[in-house]
């Protein structure tokens, strides 16, 4: 029955390129909404990107992927889906098939279904067929801007047997090759971050508190109110907004952290530049925290950890940065510190526990890729004390969600 | 107005993908969201579209204090009060004191214009959401007068973002999204030629080689972009420096690298310090 929505379960054979592609996109983790998907179908019906697979690649990406950090996921799904079938890719047939028998994924929500039903697929199909006839009659070459409001847009002209883009820069590469290049890999969110990224992430730590006790004169609001009341002076008072966040940053600068020195430095400068904390302290340590914490990288100047513990309390937020990779005895033994001659009376793990107890709102950022965590005993031990996140854009975002209490106070991220 | 042939304006070169994205956004009547590295010409795109379609462009430069309301209209109560005190203007006509913002103006034009919302990520997190209704319906109400402003012609909305903030999902779902990749050597050659039509081939190639090489260096924090390259080549030519001179030393390095630490890192490359413990 044309135009009527079917459920996937009822379909005899769900061989629709569109549906399968949607499922593949979702399978790699892209949250493609039904609205975006229908927009893509609308665009195709209007005659966009019917010429070849390459323009389809770009069109679909324009409409269903809204963050460059997700381009790599899209590339993977696209290459997986279209590899091997690119030569007999015929978008017209496929779209027409789908429009006359619109099979949908089972997992559709009520809301999505309602949206779909409001869409007149028959109308869309008619439009599309008309457009196809037109396209066969006229041969509009590519590279045109579209005409007046809402009327016929025309994409690239002409079919090309194997979906090779015509006339684009670096031409001659197929969509599959483009997708397989995966040149957006470094835009993924699990990449390492720069200062700006960190700054943006840290800004989310703000806790704005309204102090109802001490009101301040709100000058712009007063002027506005006065003018609205034709000059009758009306003073507006409102509570000032203070940021209550107090941040303590403890960074490992030991030898095994050398490859990540720049990364820690960026976190430090981002936190330092952030003027919105009520208080900010940063110290360094080597491998594990013992009696001292340092303010310089050579471990000459510093303070007693004991003293720091007295200065901070549970209103603080603590971020640890370190690879947590060391010999287990550096954590568990008295005198386990890595320096020859440093006889620590309290085992390192005790210091870590005391810090965690003092500042329950704390996380550990580990620059070591998560997949290696399981192979290092000391990471497991520290992970039992601190919630540990990967020091990447997605990791730091999660860590800050954790600190903001969005993941629940007792949440412990999985080790693997 | 019919279809307009576009092959890049004289000063703006673009890729086929970007042209297609613009076409789709116009065809579907959806805002076009443009992201990309600084210097890839995000803002210039809107001007190029306006030029190609031979229409007007309205620009809304978003700042950290910008509110969605500012784009629609502002009721200038202070001016009205002032006028009432000094007996100027027609105080009884509130419409005189309604100043339309860029979005409000674009709705009232008697032809389709291009509306550029520049650097939307500078504003508050909620800013894009506050605009959803107006951009969807292309209409709004002026509360003070009861006027209903509806777009005569839907403007072509082009939005740029520098990624300072994540944009809300509901907003993103409504946009056509395009990410401008940094231009490769081929496109870059053409871009430079637009600005420096008679540049010597040998100098151009040598500069491009050095430019991309600098961009690959890890110790450089702020990578030079297109505009820096164009300026650099202009400076080299004015000083009459030939291509082979670039082998030994890079003159006018300050044009390419804007940060002192980067210049320092470039001129005094140091092996990474190691701390042995």
Image: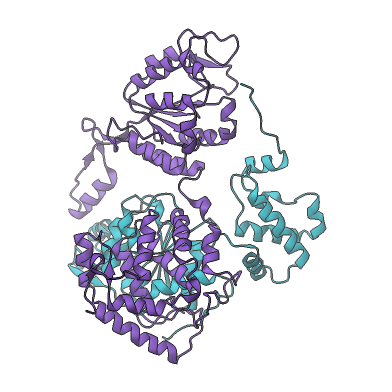
- Specify the quadrant of the image occupied by residue B189: bottom right
Q: Eyeballing the image, is B120 above or below B148?
A: above
Q: Colour of chain B?
A: cyan
Tell me the quarter of the image containing the C terminus of chain B: top right
The chain shown in purple is which? A
- For this view, does A10 lie left or right of residue B189? left
Q: Residue at x 48, y 15 (%)?
A: A290
Q: Nearer the viewer, residue B273 or B223?
A: B273
- For this view, does A189 lie left or right of residue B187? left
Q: Nearer the viewer, residue B258 or A20?
A: A20
Q: Nearer the viewer, residue A162 or B16?
A: A162
**Residue A260: percent from left, percent from top:** 56, 34
Q: Residue at x 65, y 27 (%)?
A: B274
**Residue A251: percent from left, percent from top:** 50, 27
**Residue B23: percent from left, percent from top:** 43, 75
* Residue A349 in sight in this render: yes
Tell me the quarter of the image containing the N terminus of chain B: bottom left
Q: Eyeballing the image, is A72 above or below A2?
A: above
Q: How many marks?
A: 0
- Specify the quadrant of the image occupied by residue A147: bottom left
Q: Nearer the viewer, residue A372 or B31?
A: A372
- For this view, does B257 lie left or right of residue A165? right
Name the outermost residue toward the bottom.
A137
**Residue A267: percent from left, percent from top:** 49, 35
Q: Residue at x 56, y 29 (%)?
A: A257
């Amino acid at each position: 029955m044309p135009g009527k929505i079917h459920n996937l379960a009822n379909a005899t054979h769900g061989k629709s390129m569109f549906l399968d592609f949607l499922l593949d996109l979702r399978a790699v983790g892209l949250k493609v909404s039904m609205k975006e998907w229908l927009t893509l179908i609308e665009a195709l019906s209007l005659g966009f990107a019917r010429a070849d697979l390459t323009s389809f690649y770009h069109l679909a990406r324009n409409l269903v992927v809204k963050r460059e950090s997700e381009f790599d996921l899209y590339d993977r799904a696209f290459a997986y889906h279209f590899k091997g079938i690119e030569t007999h890719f015929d978008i017209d047939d496929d779209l027409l098939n789908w429009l006359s028998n619109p099979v949908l994924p089972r997992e559709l929500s009520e809301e999505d279904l309602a949206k779909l039903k409001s869409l007149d697929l028959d109308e869309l199909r008619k439009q599309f067929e008309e457009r196809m006839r037109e396209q066969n009659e006229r041969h509009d070459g590519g590279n045109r801007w579209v005409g007046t409001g809402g009327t016929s847009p025309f994409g690239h002209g002409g079919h090309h047997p194997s979906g090779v883009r015509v006339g684009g820069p670096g031409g001659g590469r197929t969509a599959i090759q483009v997708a397989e290049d995966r040149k957006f890999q470094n835009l993924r969110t699990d990449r390492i971050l720069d200062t700006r990224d960190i700054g943006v992430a840290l800004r989310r730590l703000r806790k704005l508190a309204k102090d109802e006790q001490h009101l301040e004169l709100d000058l712009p609001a007063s002027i506005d109110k006065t003018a609205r009341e034709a000059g009758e002076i009306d003073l507006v008072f409102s509570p000032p907004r203070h940021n209550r966040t107090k941040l303590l940053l403890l960074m490992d600068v030991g030898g095994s952290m050398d490859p990540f020195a720049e990364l820690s430095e960026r976190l430090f400068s981002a936190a330092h530049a952030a003027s919105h904390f009520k208080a900010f302290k940063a110290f360094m340590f080597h491998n594990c925290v013992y009696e001292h914490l340092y303010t310089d990288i050579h471990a000459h100047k510093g303070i007693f950890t004991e003293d720091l513990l007295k200065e901070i309390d549970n209103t603080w937020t603590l971020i640890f940065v370190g690879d947590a990779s060391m010999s287990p005895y550096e954590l568990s033994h008295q005198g386990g510190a890595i320096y020859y001659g440093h006889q620590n009376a309290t085992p390192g793990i005790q210091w870590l526990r005391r810090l965690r107890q003092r500042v329950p709102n704390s996380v550990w950022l580990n620059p070591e890729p998560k997949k290696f965590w399981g192979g290092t005993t000391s990471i497991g031990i520290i992970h039992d004390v601190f919630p540990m996140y990967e020091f990447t854009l997605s990791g730091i975002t999660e860590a800050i969600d954790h600190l903001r209490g969005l993941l629940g106070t007792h949440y412990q991220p999985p080790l693997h | 107005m019919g279809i307009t042939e576009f092959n890049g304006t004289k000063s703006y070169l673009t890729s086929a993908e970007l042209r297609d994205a613009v076409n789709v956004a116009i065809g579907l009547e959806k805002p076009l969201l443009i992201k990309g590295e600084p210097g890839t010409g995000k803002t210039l795109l809107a001007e190029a579209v306006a030029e190609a379609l031979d229409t007007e462009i309205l620009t809304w430069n978003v700042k950290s204090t910008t509110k969605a309301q500012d784009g629609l209209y502002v009721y200038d109560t202070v001016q009205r009060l002032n006028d009432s005190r000094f007996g100027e203007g027609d105080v009884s006509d509130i419409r005189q004191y309604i100043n339309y913002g860029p979005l409000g103006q674009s709705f009232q034009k008697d032809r389709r214009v291009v509306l550029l919302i520049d650097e939307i990520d500078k504003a508050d997190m909620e800013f894009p959401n506050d605009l959803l209704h107006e951009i969807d319906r292309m209409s709004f109400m002026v509360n003070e007068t009861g006027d209903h402003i509806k777009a005569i012609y839907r403007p072509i909305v082009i939005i740029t973002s520098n990624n300072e903030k994540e944009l809300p999902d509901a907003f993103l779902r409504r946009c056509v999204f395009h990410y401008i990749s940094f231009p490769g050597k081929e496109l870059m050659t053409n871009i430079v030629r637009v600005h420096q039509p008679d540049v010597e081939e040998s100098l151009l190639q040598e500069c491009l080689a050095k430019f991309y090489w600098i961009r690959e260096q890890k110790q450089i924090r702020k990578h030079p972009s297109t505009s820096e390259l164009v300026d650099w080549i202009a400076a080299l030519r004015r000083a009459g420096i030939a291509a082979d001179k670039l082998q030994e030393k890079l003159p006018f390095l300050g044009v390419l690298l804007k940060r002192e630490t980067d210049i320092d890192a470039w001129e005094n490359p140091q092996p990474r310090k190691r701390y042995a413990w």
